[in-house]
Image: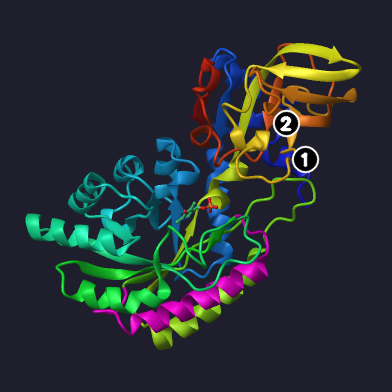
Amino acid sequence: MLDLHTKIEDFTVEDGCLTVGGRTVTELAETVEYAPFYAYDSGLIVKRVEKLRKFIPPQIKLHYAIKANPMPDVVRLLADNVDGLDVASAGEMHVALSTSCPPPEISMAGPGKSDQDLSEAVSAGITINAESEGEIERLAEIAEQTGQTPRVAIRVNPDFELKTAGMKMSGGPKQFGIDAEEVPRVLRRLAETNLEYCGFHIYSGSQNLRAEAICDSQRKTLDLAVKLAEYAPAPPQFVNIGGGFGVPYFPGDEPLDLGPIGECLQQLLTQRDSELPGTDIVLELGRYMVAEAGIYVCTIVDRKISRGHVFLVTNGGLHHHLAASGNFGQIIRKNYPVAIGNRIGSSEMEVASVVGPLCTPLDLLADKMELARAERGDLVVVFQSGAYGFTASPHLFLGHPSPTEMLV
Ligand SMILES: *Cc1c(COP(=O)(O)O)cnc(C)c1O
C-alpha cells in the first residue's frame, strides 16, 4: 500500500532532510533561492525502467510517452534507456528529436494535428499515428506534393474500454483514433496512397492499478490488431498496445503488480509469433516511468492559526501542481503524500493544512494532514510528482513566479 515511510526511504534521509540524487532538499532549495521547484531523481528513473525490464519480456518494446514529463533532461535520460518515444505535439517532437532516439522510433499521436505539425513530422521521418481519415488524406497530400513517404500507423478506437482506468480513452464515440469498424475501409484507402503503412496504435486508457484489467485489455487489443491486420496493405511493423500502468497517489492505493502483466505479455508473444510474425509489440508508458521519481518542493512563508486550525501558507500551490491540489481530473479530492522535507522523523507532529498563495480555496496541497510541526522557511515536499506536474499546471494564474525543474 502507498505509505509515506517507504516513499521517504526511496529517496533516503540525511540529518532529517530528504535527499534527491544524494543532495538534501535544503541544499537544492538554496541553488534556486528558495523558489518552489520540481526535482527528479535520475537514479530512481533508471531503476524504474530496470524494474520494468525485469518483469516485461525482452522482446516487448518499451516506449516513453513524454507528455508525462517532457523536461528535456528527463527525456534524454529515458531515451537512452527505452526503445522509443511517443510525442503528442510538434513541440514534444522537437524535444524527442534532440535525444538519442532514432526518428522512426518516435511516434506522434493526438487529435487535431495541424498541417504544419504533419509536415514537420513527415520531414523529420517520425511515425505518425493517424487519428482520423482526414489526417490520412492530408498526409497523402503532403506525400504527393513533397515526394516524401510518411510513416503512418492507424490509431484505432476499439470497441471495448479499459476497465477501472482513471481516464478512459476508448470505446464508444471518441475524438481519439478511427473507429475499429471503419479501419478495414481506411486501410484499403491507405493502400492507394504513397503512405508507408507501419502498424496500429490502440490506447485504451490511463492510471490503472489493476493488473488483471490491464491484461484483459492487452489480450483484447492484440486480438483486435490480428483481425484488422488482415485488411492491411502490408504486415504491421508494430502494434502499440498502449499502457495505462498506474501509480499509487492516495492512501490505500496498492501499487500495480507487474508479475501478472509480464506473464500475460509472454502469452501474447506466443500468439504474436503464430499470428503476426515479425510484428513488434510496443508498450507505451508515461507516468509509470517518472511519477514516483519526482518531488515538488515549496517554502512555507507564513504559519497561521484560524479558529484553532493550522495553515502552512507556502509560495507554491495549485498554479505549480494542479494534480496535487486535486483539480486535475480527480472527482473527490484526496491528499498526495506530503511531508516537511527538512524535518523528516521529527517527534513533534501536528495536524495542518498546506495551502498556496492563490485567492481561491482550491489552492490546497494538503488538507488536515499529520505533519511535522513546521515554521516559516521550512520546506514542504509533495511526493509522486514526477509526472503531470510542471507542464500540467496553470503557471500564469495570478502572476506568481514559475517553479524551477531539475534532474538530479
Ligand atoms: C497520456 C497518454 C499516455 C501516457 O499515459 P500515462 O498515464 O502517463 O502512462 C500514453 N499514450 C497516449 C496515447 C496518451 O494519450
Q: Secondary structure at mark 1?
A: helix
Image point (80%, 51%), residue name: 252
Residue 351 picture quarter: top right
* Residue 13 numbered mark, or none: 2
* Residue 251 image position (x, y, % from top left): 79, 46
Mark 1 surroundings within 10 Å by alpha-carbon count, few (fewer than 14), some (14 through 19), many (20 or more): some
* Residue 4 numbered mark, or none: 1
Residue 132 is at least partly visible in this image: yes
Three-letter code for the amino acid on which mark 2 is drawn: Val
Image point (72%, 17%), residue name: 313
Q: Is 210 situated above or below 404?
A: below
Disc 1 Cβ-to-ligand 1 distance below 8 Å: no
Disc 2 Cβ-to-ligand 1 distance below 8 Å: no
Does 220 lie within the magenta span?
Answer: yes
Q: Which residues are magenta?
A: 207-236
* Residue 305 image position (x, y, % from top left): 85, 14
Q: Secondary structure at mark 2?
A: strand
Q: Is 371 situated above or below 151?
A: above
Between circles 1 and 2, the one closer to the viewer is: 1
* Residue 106 image position (x, y, % from top left): 33, 54
Residue 45 picture quarter: top right
Q: Is residue 356 left or right of residue 371?
A: left
Q: Is residue 172 left or right of residue 200?
A: right
Residue 24 is at least partly visible in this image: no
